[in-house]
Image: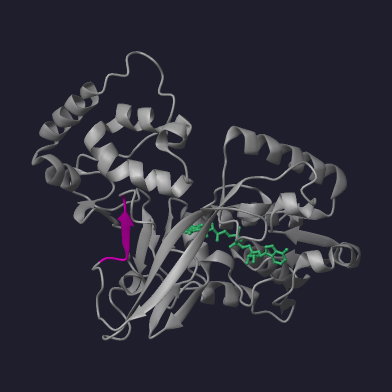
Amino acid sequence: MNYLVVGSGLFGATFAYEAAKRGHHVTVIEKRDHVAGNIYTKEVDGIQVHEYGAHIFHTSNKPVWDYVHQFADFNRYTNTPIANYNGEIYNMPFNMNTFNKLWGVVTPEEAKAKIEEQKASVNLGDKEPQNVEEQALSLVGPDVYNKLVKGYTEKQWGRKATELPAFIIRRLPVRFTYNNNYFNDPYQGIPMGGYTQIVEKMLDSDLIDVQLNTDFFDHKETYLKDYDKVVFTGMIDQFFDYQLGELEYRSLHFETEEMDVDNYQGNAVVNYTDAETPYTRVIEHKHFEFGKGDKNKTIVTREYPKDWHRGDEPYYPVNNQENNGLYAQYKELAEKQAENVIFGGRLGQYKYYNMDQVIAAALETVTTEFKN
Ligand code: FDA
């Protein structure tokens, strides 16, 4: 079989690797000038720069953790972001360090009592929370909400918390320990030498031909005619020329700066949780590798959320009821009108996948496609 894989991100690369392993020819086309999709990292001053935002691999899926280790060794990085609220520093996720800094409480019992007192201070009556503000207040009370949730969430979504549906914040992780590890998964780390090598190794086969700077939509009909099967990891609504309407995405704008200092902020990820700072996060890349790289240089990236319009990078699907309903219609259309196309990955399946989930989904597709 001759496969065309559209997109060289983790989904496309995993599929291409597995298809070539089974003796199939694969052409991978990629519209960007590099492989690896959003996990792309580039070395600058000996530092692996996460070009499309902070990427921390974390998973509970042991087979996926073992799988990805074929392509890279991982360090023992643990995600411990901090929040900067107008110059006040708090640990995340909300834990005993956060509560101690906010209220001076020392024991879990004191912290629990304080949170109950905070929750009781907002009187929502018996009604269900109607928006993010009410939801967050009912979960953690006003101090945590005002300093650590409100501004960040409003910047992220570009709307007032009172105008955002409550389901966006189903729960706010509150921990009554002094553990700053953001994730609960047993496996976590960053590939030593960056993420790009993973995809490069996956695509390094005589049976795989990679074409960069090549957009599927420039020759859609020819591609569909020339290949037995297409694996499409771009936007499913764009594939169908938005004929049922546009799915909603959130986009981002990254500003990266090289600085002549060894250590700018002392942590890989700092969230800015006030409403006035226009960016949500500042990433200092060298800390993903414990300060590796040039001692007199550092690279930081500021992350600005923005609305998505046609032509922007669609970083996040917005999985609300309306969009999920529209996606279901596109999926139905795909089943009827695009039998030889497999839609995969974050954009093809319109799902807020993490890296481990994308690998798992691609491997599932491989099993379905090759029956082994
Ligand atoms: P991905 O978007 O990576 O790849 C699709 C590729 O297709 C792109 O290279 C694109 O250019 C190409 N393409 C699209 N249309 C095309 C066309 N018409 N023609 C040719 N090529 C086309 N996950 C995690 O586990 N831990 C983390 O910390 C983070 N952090 C994070 C931060 C930010 C800011 C984002 C946006 C995402 C994350 N993620 C994450 C999620 C992670 O990036 C994601 O799971 C994978 O990169 C998804 O891989 P895909 O292959 O699905 O898509």
Q: Is residue 231 visible?
A: yes
Going 27% across and 39% down the picture, which residue do you hit? 146
Q: Is residue 174 visible?
A: no
Quarter-of-image position of residue 219: bottom right
In the rendered image, which quarter contains the C terminus? bottom right
Going 55% across and 65% down the picture, which residue do you hit? 38
Q: Residue 305 versus residue 263: which sits nearer the camera?
A: 305
Going 81% across and 42% down the picture, which residue do you hit? 333
* Left or right for 369, reference 102: right
- Work out which residue is located at the far front of the displayed protein and give it: 276
Quarter-of-image position of residue 96: top left
What is the x, y in percent for residue 310?
67, 56
Residues in magenta? 267-273
Q: Is residue 94 above or below residue 24?
A: above
Q: Is residue 131 above or below residue 331?
A: above
What is the x, y in percent for residue 130?
44, 24
- Work out which residue is located at the far top of the displayed protein and give it: 126
* Left or right for 227, reference 75: right
